[in-house]
Amino acid sequence: MAGNKQKVIFYIDGFNFYFGLKSKKWKKYYWLDIVPFCNQFLKPHQELVEVHYFSAIPTNTDGDQERQDLFFSANKLNPKFNLHLGKFMEKSKKCNSCGATYKTFEEKETDVNIATNMIRDVVQKNCSISILISADSDLIPPINFIREHDPSHRIMVYFPPNRFSFDLKNKANVYLKLESHKDKFEKAILPEEITLSNGYILKKPKHWK
């Protein structure tokens, strides 16, 4: 019965996921329907509660922000998609070759936001299985806490393409490499055009084809 199904929540490290896809040159999968993509990994006795997606707004002007906004807008049409935005912090770096100083931006708050949401959902018993899509070993502390708080809670780690962490692998009940599941990416690509309720049409960015 549906009421007895195991409840599953996904937590996606957006930058880790994006740069994994980028490293494989899988541009067309940037335009991914996140909730259906995650749903493909569930067993018949499991139920997807929601997907938490963690990212930040780019600060450059080469169109990244506009493309990301389209991706977020398309996915937010699904009520199970929850977006959590961190921020970029400006910092100075020194060139190792010439010694010149230049400004760059570093994404902040993602790790903390993921940890907070994972722990909250376990403490509040919102799910019995947590699935983390990331290869960031900085997320081991919240996993350790969950293990102590509820040893029966299952934690799975899905590694983005070309991303892996032995430490996270050893902490997971189950792990898998998403690059081995290209068929699931293919089945979850969003339509080229999506019409919103107000009549506005979202179009897949040309750079992502």
Image (cartoon, rainbow, N blue to C red):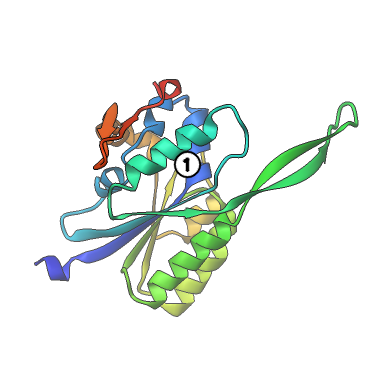
Q: Residues within 10 Å of mark 1 (few under 14, many from 20)?
A: many
> Relative to the observer, which residue lies in front, 198 or 5?
198
Count of picture labels: 1
The image quadrant that residue 99 belongs to is top right
Q: Residue at x 37, y 33 (%)?
A: 31
Residue pushed farthest left?
A: 1
Whether residue 7 is visible, yes or no, is: yes
Image point (49%, 57%), residue name = 170
Seen in the picture, residue 50 relative to 26 is either above or below; the reply is below
Residue situated furthest front in the rendering: 198
173 on left or right of 136: left
Could you tell me residue 149's position as x and y percent?
A: 45, 79
Quadrant placement of the N terminus: bottom left
Q: Quadrant of residue 91?
A: top right
- Taking the spot 45% from the left edge, 22% from the top edge, the residue there is 207
Depth check: 157 or 49 in front?
A: 49
195 is higher (above) or lower (below) than 25: below
The three-letter amino acid code for the residue at tag 1 is Phe
Give the x, y percent position of residue 138: 59, 57
- In the image, residue 88 above or below residue 19: below
Q: Secondary structure at mark 1?
A: helix
Front residue of this view, candidates 47 and 194: 194
* Visible residue check, residue 162: no
Residue placed under numbered mark 1 in the picture:
17
| Residue located 87% across and 27% down the image | 97
Q: How far across and down, in percent of the image, does residue 25 sit?
A: 47, 24
